[in-house]
């Protein structure tokens, strides 16, 4: 099954190997168009995954603040999402 992350009808990520955690698709970094992501200063903490770092998306003049996140150094129970990126907010996740 292919999964896409889409903002303003632009595909930001396309993958057949996402990992689903808590209902979110985590895309392998190599399947994400990193040129559309801008590092954010936002960070959050999850007790079992660790520290999340965020990206804002710049897509056709629309800035989606903190619409993507990753766990660059996850805790052991979440090691399978290392080097993966998830999306939320205005980003549509499409499965086919």
Image (cartoon, helix red, strand yellow):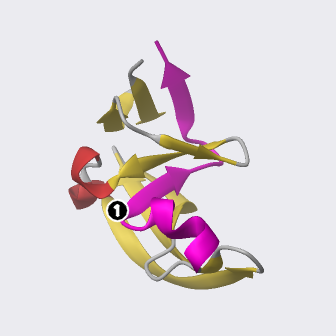
Image x and y of residue 74, in percent: 53, 78
In this view, the residue in front, 47 or 37, is: 47
Instruction: Identify residue for label 1.
Output: 37
User: x and y percent of residue 36 in the render?
Assistant: 29, 56
Q: Secondary structure at mark 1?
A: strand
Residue furthest top in the image: 96
Q: Is residue 51 above or below residue 68?
A: below
* Magenta segment: 76-96
Point 25% across, 49% down: residue = 33
In this view of the protein, can residue 7 be seen by the observer? no
Q: Residues within 10 Å of mark 1 (few under 14, many from 20)?
A: many
> Left or right of 77: which side holds 93?
left
Q: Quadrant of residue 51?
A: bottom right
Q: Nearer the viewer, residue 58 or 37?
A: 37
**Residue in view at x 43 percent, y 78 percent:** 72
Work out whether 41 lies above or below 20.
Answer: below
For residue 62, side relative to residue 51 (left or right): left
Residue positioned 21% across, 59% down in the render: 35
- Residue 84, percent from left and from top: 41, 58
Farthest right residue in view: 47
Residue at 26% x, 45% y is: 31
Q: Quadrant of residue 9?
A: top left
Query: Which image quadrant: the N terminus?
Result: top left
Residue 46 against residue 3 in the figure, above or below: below
Percent across and percent down for residue 80 are 48, 60
Residue 74 or residue 8, whichever sits in front = 74
Q: Is residue 91 magenta?
A: yes
């Amino acid at each position: 099954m292919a999964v896409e992350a889409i903002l303003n009808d632009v595909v930001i990520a396309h993958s057949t190997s996402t990992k689903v955690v808590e209902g979110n698709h985590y895309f392998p970094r190599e399947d994400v168009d990193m040129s559309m992501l801008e590092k954010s200063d936002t960070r959050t903490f999850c007790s079992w995954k660790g520290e999340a770092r965020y990206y804002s998306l710049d897509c056709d003049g629309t800035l989606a603040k903190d619409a993507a996140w990753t766990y660059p150094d996850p805790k052991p129970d979440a090691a399978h999402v290392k080097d993966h990126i998830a999306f939320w907010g205005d980003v549509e996740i499409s499965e086919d």
